[in-house]
Image: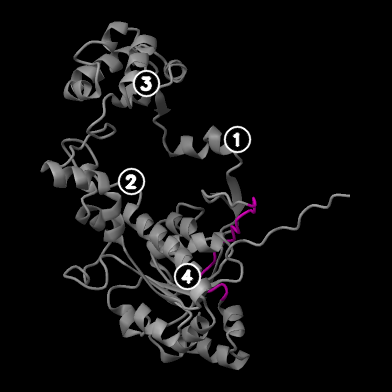
């Protein structure tokens, strides 16, 4: 008789992460670790906690950023300005594998929580500093909110319309730094597995976005002319844009090579003569004649409904998409067909949540735990750290914990 294989542990089962975190970058990194099975202890201020809790009330009264980046964590409300609070934190760090912080510049060092100090004290600890601009240099002290870093990194200069730059509609600098912190922790855990030692990991939001700017950065450095802002278009490929259809929606398409242009001209535009027309036959020519190229494509799609346009483009092997909004994403048939939605708990009741993008090789479900209330786990964490009931009561009485 065949017996089902026992469930496999998640990759980070047994790993403990302590994080003094706020906003998006560090919480996004540690949420990935929690999804993979790590125990993540989120250290928050007693007077309101992570300020991202107050960004909005969109999710049944809870903040959308906070719900997105904090599932699966335990919350302890701890005053780190009080020596007793700092002592509690060190009790937690002493037994942790990873420590993460994204406090304002200089704050961690003043508390002795910078990666250099912690790694000297706890040689097996992986200590992660997430900052806006890095620990040194003329910008180290600057406040680093996502929009500001997008502008400093040049992302806003290549995003938007020819008339107006724009920041990305998602916190790209925060997400980039968070994902590099996450991958940095995984790499450091692998190294510790062979050397037995932890060490510091440093990630800055500016460095993350500067890496992501590789294509436009090279174009600007090597040609002296930065890429033009083209909204939904592309600076060196044509046609590549959104085009209106007969039912008032927009369809995006991208022609990546001249063979695809021939198929588009013959099967979608129904103007086969354009396949060999010197003004359109090569991508260089189409880009040089972008206005004429776009006008030809727009004219053809304007007479088609969205579904018909998509059907023609796909039949011709042309990459295409609908211009969806967030409502269409929430109900996207591909996400539904692949069973990508789960339900997680929050202090305001269950909410839908998407599975992490990576499917594990053994097919294990990620640990998508509940979003914690502020200080929800303070008592259990103090007990596990060896505090007696009397000691915990004294800390609570003096508002060192909440």
Query: Is 372 in the magenta?
Result: yes
Q: For the residue carrying disc 3, how many other residues have a C-alpha within 10 Å: few (<14), some (14-19), or many (20+)?
A: few
Q: Measure the alpha-carbon separation of dots 3 and 1.
A: 27 Å
Residue occupying the far right of the picture:
1
Residue found at x 54% / y 63%: 34
Q: Which circle, 3 or 1, is nearer the viewer?
A: 1
Q: Secondary structure at mark 3?
A: loop
Tell me which label, 3 or 1, sits earlier in the chain.
Answer: 3
Answer left or right for 336 relative to 241: right
Image quadrant of residue 66?
bottom left
Tell me which label, 1 or 4, sits earlier in the chain.
Answer: 4
Residue 29 drawn at (x, y percent)? 44, 62
Q: Are marks 4 and 2 in contact (CB under 8 Å)?
A: no
Mark 2 highlights which residue?
169
Mark 1 highlights which residue?
337
Tell me which label, 3 or 2, sits earlier in the chain.
Answer: 2
Q: Measure the alpha-carbon separation of dots 4 and 2.
A: 36 Å
Q: Secondary structure at mark 2?
A: loop
Q: Is residue 9 visible?
A: yes
**Position above or below: 174 against 294:** below
Image quadrant of residue 324?
top left
Q: How many marks overall?
A: 4
Q: For the residue carrying disc 1, how many other residues have a C-alpha within 10 Å: few (<14), some (14-19), or many (20+)?
A: few
Q: Which circle, 4 or 2, is nearer the viewer?
A: 4
**Position above or below: 275 against 166:** above
Residue 391 drawn at (x, y percent)? 56, 92
In the picture, the disc for residue 248 is: 3
Mark 4 highlights which residue?
191
**Position above or below: 300 against 129:** above
Q: Nearer the viewer, residue 317 or 96?
A: 317
């Amino acid at each position: 008789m065949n017996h089902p294989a026992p469930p496999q542990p998640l990759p980070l089962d047994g790993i403990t992460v302590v994080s003094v975190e706020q906003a998006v970058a560090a919480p996004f990194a540690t949420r990935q670790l929690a999804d993979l099975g790590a125990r993540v202890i989120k250290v928050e201020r007693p007077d309101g906690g992570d300020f991202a809790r107050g960004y909005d009330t969109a999710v049944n009264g809870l903040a959308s950023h906070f719900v997105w980046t904090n599932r699966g964590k335990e919350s302890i409300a701890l005053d780190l300005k009080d020596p007793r609070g700092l002592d509690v934190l060190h009790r937690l760090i002493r037994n942790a594998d990873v420590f993460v912080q994204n406090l304002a510049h200089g704050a961690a060092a003043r508390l002795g929580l910078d990666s250099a100090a912690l790694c000297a004290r706890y040689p097996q600890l992986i200590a992660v500093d997430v900052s806006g601009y890095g620990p040194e240099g003329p910008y180290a002290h600057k406040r680093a909110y996502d929009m500001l870093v997008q502008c400093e990194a040049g992302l806003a200069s290549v995003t938007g319309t020819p008339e107006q730059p724009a920041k990305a509609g998602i916190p790209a600098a925060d997400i980039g730094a968070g994902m590099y912190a996450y991958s940095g922790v995984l790499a450091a855990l692998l190294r510790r597995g062979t050397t037995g030692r932890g060490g510091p990991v440093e990630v800055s939001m500016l460095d993350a976005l500067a890496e992501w700017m590789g294509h436009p950065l090279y174009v600007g450095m090597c040609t002296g002319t930065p890429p033009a802002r083209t909204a939904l278009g592309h600076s060196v490929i044509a046609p590549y844009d959104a085009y209106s259809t007969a039912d008032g929606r927009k369809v995006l398409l991208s022609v990546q090579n001249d063979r695809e242009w021939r198929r588009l001209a013959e099967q979608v535009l129904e103007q086969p003569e354009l396949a060999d027309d010197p003004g359109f036959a090569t991508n260089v020519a189409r880009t040089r004649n972008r206005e004429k190229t776009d006008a030809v494509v727009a004219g053809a799609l304007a007479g088609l409904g969205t579904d018909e346009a998509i059907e023609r483009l796909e039949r011709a092997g042309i990459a295409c998409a609908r211009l969806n909004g967030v409502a269409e994403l929430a109900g996207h048939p591909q996400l539904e067909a692949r069973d990508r939605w789960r339900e997680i708990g929050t202090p305001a009741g269950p909410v839908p949540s998407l599975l992490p993008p990576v499917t594990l090789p053994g097919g294990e479900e990620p640990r998508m735990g509940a979003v914690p209330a502020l200080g929800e786990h303070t008592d259990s964490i103090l007990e596990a750290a060896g505090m007696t009931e009397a000691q915990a009561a004294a800390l609570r009485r003096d508002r060192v914990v909440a």
